[in-house]
Amino acid sequence: MAEAKPPDNLPRHVAVIMDGNGRWAEARGQGRIAGHQAGIDAVREVVRSARERRIRYLTLFAFSTENWNRPRLEVDELMRLLQRYLRSELDELHEHRIRVRAIGALDRLPRVVRRLLDRAIADTAHHDGMDLVFALSYGGRAEIVDAARRLARDAERGEVDPEQIDEKVFAAYLQAPDLPDPDLLIRTGGESRLSNFLLWQLAYSELHITPVMWPDFGPGDFAEALDAFSARERRYGLTGAQVRDRSQGGAA
Ligand code: FPP
C-alpha cells in the first residue's frame, strides 16, 4: 500500500554517508578517534532533525565491510562508540517512537555490540514514528551477492521460476525489502563516490554532496539538503514535460 506523501515534497527516505571524521580531527591536531567521538553528536542531531522534519526512513552508513581493515585501535573504538550510542540513546528513541533497524553482515560485529543492537531492534520493533536504519559491516556488493545466492537456492528448489525473475522479485531478496529506495543520499566530507553503499537501492536517488565534515554537519546543513531536494525534479528517465504532465494528473 502506498504511504502518504511526505510534506513539502520532502524525501521519504534519506540515506547518509557520514564521512570526514578523520579529517575533521586531523585539522584540529587531534587523533582520528576524536573525530568519531564528535561524529556521535552529529548522529544524534541528524536523527532529531529527520524526526522533526517527519522523514519516515533514515539510513546511516556507520561502518562498512572495508572499515574492518582500518587499524585495530580505530575499529575497536568505533565498536565502543556504537555501544555507547546504543546504550545512551535508547530512551530518546523510545520517546519519539523510533524503530531501530540494521543491515549488513551483523554476525561479524563483536558479541556485545550485536547483543545491544538486537535488544534495541527488538525493543523498538513496534514503533512507527521513524525507521532508523544502521548500515553496519555493510557492503552493497555483498548484499547483492547474498541476495543472488538465496534467489538461486530458491530457484534450484523450484520455488522461483527463473523466467519470472524481474527487478521486483530480486529486490525482495535484499536485506530490508520493505524499505523504499532512498529518495535522497547525503554525503558529507566532499568526496563524490558511493563507497559501496546501497548500490541497488540508490539507482534513482538524488545526490547531495557537501564539503562539510560529518562532525560539523548540523540541523542547518540537513535543512539545506532537504531544500535542495525539494527544488529538484525527479524524472526517472522521462522528459521534464512528461513528469509535469503526470504530476498535474495527466497520463497515469
Ligand atoms: C567516516 O569518516 C566515518 C566512519 C568510518 C564511521 C562513522 C561513525 C560515526 C559517525 C560515529 C559512530 C556512529 C554511530 C552510528 C554511533 P572517516 O574516518 O572515513 O573520515 P576521513 O574520510 O576524514 O578519514
Image (cartoon, rainbow, N blue to C red):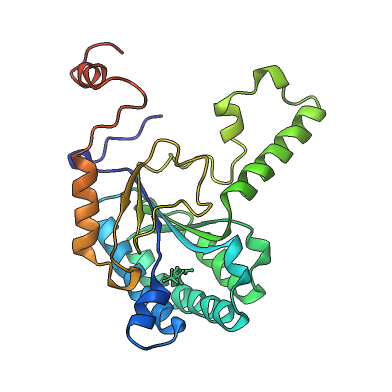
- Residue 196, above or below 92: above
- Residue 50, above or below 171: below
Left/right of residue 118 with respect to residue 236 in the rendered view? right
- Residue 201, above or below 86: above
* Residue shown at 29% from the left, 43% from the top: 11
* Residue 144 lies in quadrant: top right
The x, y position of residue 69, in whole percent, is: 63, 70
| Quadrant of image for the N terminus | top left
Is any atom of residue 33 visible in this view?
Answer: yes
Image label count: 0
Q: Residue furthest right?
A: 157
* Residue 74 lies in quadrant: bottom right
Q: Foreground: 43 or 191?
A: 191
Is any atom of residue 114 visible in this view?
Answer: no
* Residue shown at 32% from the left, 85% from the top: 28
Q: Foreground: 148 or 90?
A: 148
Quadrant in which ligand 1 is drawn: bottom left
Q: Residue furthest bottom?
A: 29
Left/right of residue 15 with respect to residue 63 in the rendered view? left
* Residue shown at 73% from the left, 40% from the top: 149
| Quadrant of image for the C terminus | top left
Q: Foreground: 211 or 49?
A: 211
Left/right of residue 101 with respect to residue 68 in the rendered view? left
The x, y position of residue 233, in whole percent, is: 24, 32
* Residue 115 lies in quadrant: bottom right
The x, y position of residue 85, in whole percent, is: 44, 75
* Residue shown at 25% from the left, 60% from the top: 49
- Residue 99, above or below 2: below
Q: Foreground: 117 or 232?
A: 232
The x, y position of residue 73, in whole percent, is: 58, 84
Left/right of residue 202 with respect to residue 247 in the rendered view? right
